[in-house]
């Protein structure tokens, strides 16, 4: 039986930036990539499905607000998004954002992480393991990089890194001078959680 893996992200491209190498390195995983935003984005939505194909994954995308003002969203919106869009609820591994985000700062990243924890606590989704992206930009002093305190540090081979970068540039269409192309990590970092506080 292959490992069933759910990646929960705020945006199309987060899967590539923060765990693209991990996904490319585990072809045998049964992968679902879920983006909470940008379904109605006529540019990024189709790119998401092309990227997901590169990972051999099943893609799901929803349309929660992602406006520039980043007004906080209620947990119920995330909960309903999962209930309405995700058929399979039980996984071997869920991978998501850090509750502190990956850089300073994007509220949706932090919300997705917190929502994932509550979804697990609420038994809306189940998993044996939960991995968080583990990056920092040292409060904007540096480009985001994988933190030394990661439980898993994955240094990508040139081959895997090239493929990850190609998805960012060729599929998502970021220019070589873009922030994304500049910071795309060659070493990916994850914090791993295997035990959960249960209800009751
Ligand atoms: Zn994002």
Image: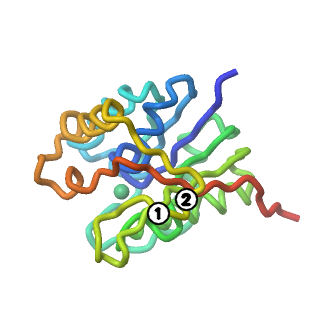
Q: Residue at x 30, y 32 (%)?
A: 163
Whether residue 116 sits left or right of residue 158 in the image: it is right
Query: Which quadrant of the figure shows ligand 1?
Result: bottom left
Q: Tell me if residue 69 can be seen.
A: yes
**Quarter of the image containing the N terminus?**
top right
The residue where tag 1 is placed is 147
Residue reaching furthest to the right = 200
Q: Residue 89 at what x, y percent from top left?
A: 67, 40
Q: Is mark 2 within 8 Å of ligand 1?
A: no
Q: CA distance from mark 1 to mark 2?
A: 6 Å
Q: Secondary structure at mark 2?
A: loop
Check if mark 1's residue and mark 2's residue have beta carbons within 8 Å: yes
Whether residue 84 sits left or right of residue 12 in the image: it is right
Q: Residue 199 at what x, y percent from top left?
A: 83, 63
Q: Nearer the viewer, residue 60 or 57?
A: 57
Q: Residue 61 at what x, y percent from top left?
A: 42, 42
């Amino acid at each position: 039986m292959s490992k069933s893996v759910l990646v929960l992200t705020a945006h199309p491209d987060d899967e590539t930036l923060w765990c693209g190498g991990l996904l490319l390195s585990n072809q045998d995983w049964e992968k679902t990539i879920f983006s909470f935003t940008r379904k109605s984005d006529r540019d990024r939505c189709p790119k998401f499905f092309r990227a997901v194909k590169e990972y051999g994954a099943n893609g799901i995308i929803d349309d929660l607000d992602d406006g520039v003002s980043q007004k906080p969203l209620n947990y119920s919106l995330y909960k309903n998004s999962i209930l309405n869009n995700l058929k399979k609820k039980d996984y071997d591994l869920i991978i998501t954002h850090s509750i502190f985000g990956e850089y300073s700062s994007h509220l949706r990243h932090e919300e997705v992480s917190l929502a994932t924890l509550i979804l697990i606590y609420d038994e809306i989704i189940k998993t044996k393991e939960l991995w968080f992206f583990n990056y920092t930009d040292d409060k904007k002093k540096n480009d985001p990089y994988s933190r030394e305190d990661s439980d898993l540090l994955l240094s990508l081979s040139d081959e895997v890194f090239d493929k990850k970068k190609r998805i960012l540039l060729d599929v998502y269409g970021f220019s070589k001078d873009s922030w994304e192309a500049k910071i795309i990590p060659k070493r990916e970092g994850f914090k791993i959680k295997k035990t959960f506080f249960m209800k009751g």
